Image (cartoon, rainbow, N blue to C red):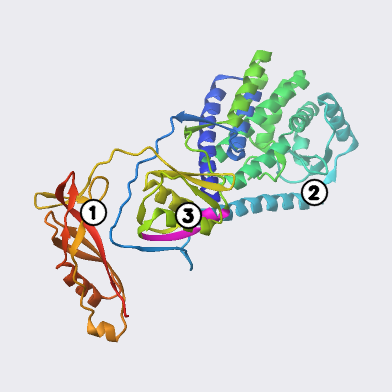
Amino acid sequence: MTTLEQFIELAVVNAATAFVLAVIAAAVARRIRWSAAVHALWLVVLLRLIVPPVVGVPILPPADAPEQHALVSLDAASARLATVDGRTLPSLPQIGGAVWIIGAMAIAGIGGLRSRRLRRALQVCAPADPALRRRVEELADRLGVRPPRTLLVTGRVPPMLWGRLSGAVLLLPDELLERLSPPQIEALIAHELAHLKRRDHWVRWLELTVTVTWWFNPVTWWARRRLRQAEERCCDAVVARTLPDHARAYADTLVETLRFLAGTRITHPVGAVAMADLSEVQRRLEMILSTARVRNPSPAAHLALATLLVAALTVTPMLSAGAPDRELPAAFDEPITLSLNEAKLADVLRTFATLTQVQMVVEPAVTGSVTVELRDVPAWEALDRVTMMNNAAWRFEDGTVTVYSLDPAEPSPMLVGHLGDTPVYKVDGDITDPKKISAPPPQYPEDCRAERVMGLVVLDTVIDATGTVVDVSVERSPDNRLSEAAMDAIRSWVFEPATLEGKPVAVRYVLTVNFRLE
């Protein structure tokens, strides 16, 4: 399996698993009021999109490899095995990869542009007055966090906490503060500091990573929105615990903020957590103003949640255990072309060993010949086809390819057609080869001789139970004139017929005529 194929397979598995987890998270969110658990579930959905599976659990037994039988041609030997040269059209995965990269660059560019605009805006921001800074410091101390730098901004922008490597910055719109009472301002500041305590600004960077990688997946945008909604409810709970006497003021703050931002298009710079998701104001107000005390989850509930989250991140359901991936050298991924006509299997395997520069060991029970047409396939896939056609398989261990025999299938004659009511078989298993009795050489066309036209003509024939060639067609020929001469000659050939259990039978048979200038 190529690196691109492995990446696509991993992406599909992660996307499917993330979708299932998203459905579970949405169902759980409707039934419980434990906001932290809901937030954790949606966070795992995002992580699941980018974290590779650690433990694969098959949900179906591994499928048996399909049986394949050799297509043997007789009295012919022509083989070509070479790397493919020249340009090829891009494959569908390559086109998809290019579209993915373009989209990822666009998402990353939009995030960078928003952050740049915010940095420019900070250059004209005014520092908070001493009284406001003291309020921030007091509330930060109560929440157990380091007080962020506080700036006042102009314009209709939401209150936000911007997390940077140099430290967090709290941005408060001065026009909104003028509308709020002191308790409402405290509730607003406590809400933003709750984001700082929960490290929600770092979750924004995770969101960016997942969105850049999975911008085309609807689950990404679904999880982002639900995660931010759960985030706001978690911060509401922190404010309720920190300022228990400010419930009414906090509710009024949410409503006033909603009025303040009405008609404003909200953008989120990278690493910024803004009080802008007010889509669940009614539900949040009901929770804030509720007099019923929400009980803290028990230790057992925390343990169950932790177990569920770890399992969701590490265990991946798979349709089948399948065969273990083979860590192959890069040469096995190179495209090759196979055009083989009754080439000896041993010779073909030696050619594979030369192309891939690996040692190849063939068990004595593995024998046969190969007739196959493959174009632009990876070397490992071609080796699969060649070995399975002869009821064999291969494994790569410690730098060595070992070709071993599979359990032989029950031999049975292969029917390939009919002559009237008479069956025509392929020479295989218990059917013996027809043998030449009389084979007059073909007449070399004089004009071909004069033009020095020569080469091998490969013909597909049917030889009946009397040993007579009753049908002939050309499979490959360097020139039509040589084809006519070869067919005229072969129609006069006489054979000892092929036999099945001692009885003459009609067979399909490949013959060759080689025109050479002495």
Q: How far apart are marks 2 and 3 (CA)?
A: 55 Å
Secondary structure of the residue carrying numbered label 1: loop
Residue ID for mark 3: 378
Mark 2 or 3 closer to N-term? Answer: 2
Q: Distance between the residues labelled 1 and 2?
A: 89 Å
Mark 1 or 3 closer to N-term? Answer: 3
9 to 341, vertically: above or below: above
Closest to the observer, 105 or 51: 51
Say which mark, if any, is on residue 71: none
Residue 331 located within the stretch drawn in magenta = yes
Write the residue at 13% across / 60% down: 468
Asked whether residue 285 appears in the rendered view, the answer is no
- Residue 482 placed where, x, y %? 24, 75
* 2 sits left or right of 303 in the view: left
Write the residue at 48% across / 38% down: 323
From this viewpoint, which residue is outermost toward the left? 421
Residue 175 located within the stretch drawn in magenta = no
Secondary structure of the residue carrying numbered label 2: helix
Question: Of the residues shown, which amino acid type is indicated by label 1?
Answer: Asp
Residue ID for mark 2: 122
Q: Tell me the magenta residue range.
A: 330-340
Q: Residue 225 is drawn in which quadrant?
A: top right
Considering the image in quadrants, where does the C terminus appear?
bottom left
Residue ID for mark 1: 433
Closest to the observer, 234 or 46: 46
Disc 1 to disc 2: CB gap under 8 Å: no
- Residue 51 placed where, x, y %? 62, 38
From this viewpoint, which residue is outermost toward the bottom? 450
